[in-house]
Image: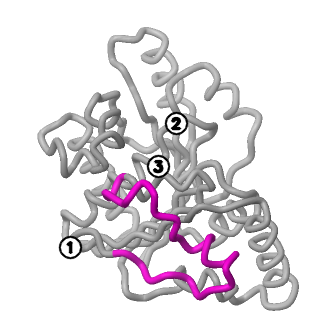
Amino acid sequence: MTILAMQGIRGGCGTTAVCASLAWALAQTGQSVLVVDFSINNVLRLHFNHAWSSKEGWASALKLQQSPPPVISYAPGIDYLPFGFSEKETYSLINEGLFEQKEHQPEKLPGFLAFLSSNDYQWIIIDCSNTLSSLKELSNSLADINLVLLNPDVECHVLLGQNSFPANRYFLINGFSPTSLIQQDISHIWQQSLSGLIPVILHRDEAMAESLAVKKTPGESQPDSLIVQDIHQLALWCQSLDKQGS
């Protein structure tokens, strides 16, 4: 089993959509995938045609003092687990549980996150966009691969110099528009100087922008689009990296 945690260097980098799309692409190559939402936005589920009004999720179950809900099967090879609708009280419970685990049983996961130790999948993908710092720290420590999404703009370039990243991190350019001169320049700078930059670029594509509206990944709704080809290449890269590490 390989754990892949994904986060944007800032909000709006497209992390959630890429998480869902990568899961679909991996499943299309015969891999089994569990996609877990760590984001308090609780949006990942909507890429898998989940009901808008549904409140279920692993975090909402924690507040109700219930066991984590069973994972939801979406398509062959893809299961997902929503974060659930939650409030600040839930965040406190998560932080307290992770603090207790770190203090007293650092080698074990707290019971409400036991699904992260499942051996039923070849891949577990964690959406770490807009999450609690405690969950981000945990996912960074558990992940075999940490993917940091970058939009090719000046703000992301500045933030690269102001942030620290896990040792096993890789950078992925998302939303690239080849007609933009500034994006061309920034991408060229990163390709020349940024260690850990993945040799795959995700282009800006309306198919990705429309995926949330139709509640399906581009691989399912628009399989012939450019972004689906890009995500397929990303899936192959992930698998090649996984084989190198095994």
- Going by the numbered disc 2, the residue's amino acid type is Cys
Q: Nearer the viewer, residue 153 or 213?
A: 213
Q: Does the magenta stretch include residue 99?
A: no
Residue 53 bears which disc, if any?
none
User: Disc 1 vs disc 2: which is toward the camera?
Assistant: 1
Figure colour scheme: one colour
Q: Distance between the residues labelled 1 and 3?
A: 20 Å
Q: Distance between the residues labelled 3 and 2?
A: 9 Å
The residue indicated by pointer 3 is 16
Q: Nearer the viewer, residue 242 or 136?
A: 136
Q: Residue at x 69, y 31 (%)?
A: 159
Q: Magenta residues, as a range?
A: 47-72
Residues packed near mark 1 inside 10 Å, few (<14), some (14 to 19) or many (20 plus): few
User: Vertically, is 53 above or below 143?
Assistant: above
Of label 1 and label 3, which has the lower sequence position?
3
Q: Nearer the viewer, residue 1 or 24?
A: 24
The residue indicated by pointer 1 is 76
The residue indicated by pointer 2 is 13
User: Vertically, is 129 above or below 113?
Assistant: above
